Image (tube, rainbow, N blue to C red):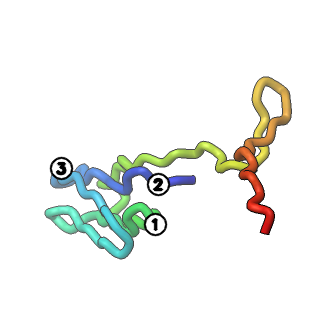
Amino acid sequence: MKILRNSAKCLKCGSHICSRHRHDFQRCNCGAIFVDGGLAYLRSGGDLQYYEDTSIVDDTPPSGVHSEQNGERRQHVQPERADDGD
């Protein structure tokens, strides 16, 4: 999972908050919700009745991870690099 945006909207005060980097703790204007972690990790909380997650994550499997598509098992691999002959 790759985090593209770590953000939330407060349904109490209408603030949209976004954590941009690791340990970038952000709280909405009324203090009801928070987000933290930037693109390193997803951390959020507060009064969840006012919390709307607006984060964006990419769930595309990384290279070398098996996935199934159309009933076929496939493996995502990166092309091999030429050996220097060391």
The amino acid type found where label 2 is placed reads: Ile
Question: Disc 3 vs disc 1: Cβ atoms closer than 8 Å?
Answer: no
29 and 42: which one is in front? Answer: 42
Residue 70 location in percent, x, y? Answer: 78, 24
Q: Residues within 10 Å of mark 2 (few under 14, many from 20)?
A: some
Residue contact at pointers 1 and 2, CB within 8 angstroms: yes
Mark 3 vs 2, N-terminal side: 2
Q: Secondary structure at mark 3?
A: loop
Which residue is the site of mark 2? 3
Disc 1/disc 2 C-alpha distance (Å): 7 Å
Q: Split into 4 quadrants, where in the image is the C terminus?
A: bottom right
Between disc 1 and disc 2, whose residue precedes?
Answer: 2
> Which residue is at the far front?
85
- Image quadrant in which you'd find residue 51: bottom left
Residue that badge 1 annotates: 40
| Residue 79: x %, y % from top left | 72, 44
> Closer to the camera, 57 or 16?
57
Q: Regarding mark 2 in the picture, which secondary structure is present there?
A: strand
Q: Residues within 10 Å of mark 1 (few under 14, many from 20)?
A: some
* Residue for badge 3: 14
The answer to which of marks 3 and 1 sits earlier in the sequence is: 3
Residue 43 to residue 78: above or below:
below
Q: Kindly report the distance in space between the C-alpha atoms of the residues bearing marks 3 and 1.
A: 25 Å
The structure residue drawn at horizontal position 35% and vertical position 75%, both measured from the top left corner, is 23
- x and y percentages locating residue 61 in the rendered image: 65, 46
Instruction: From the top left corner, tell me how far across and down residue 75 is, in percent.
Output: 79, 41
Secondary structure, mark 1, is loop
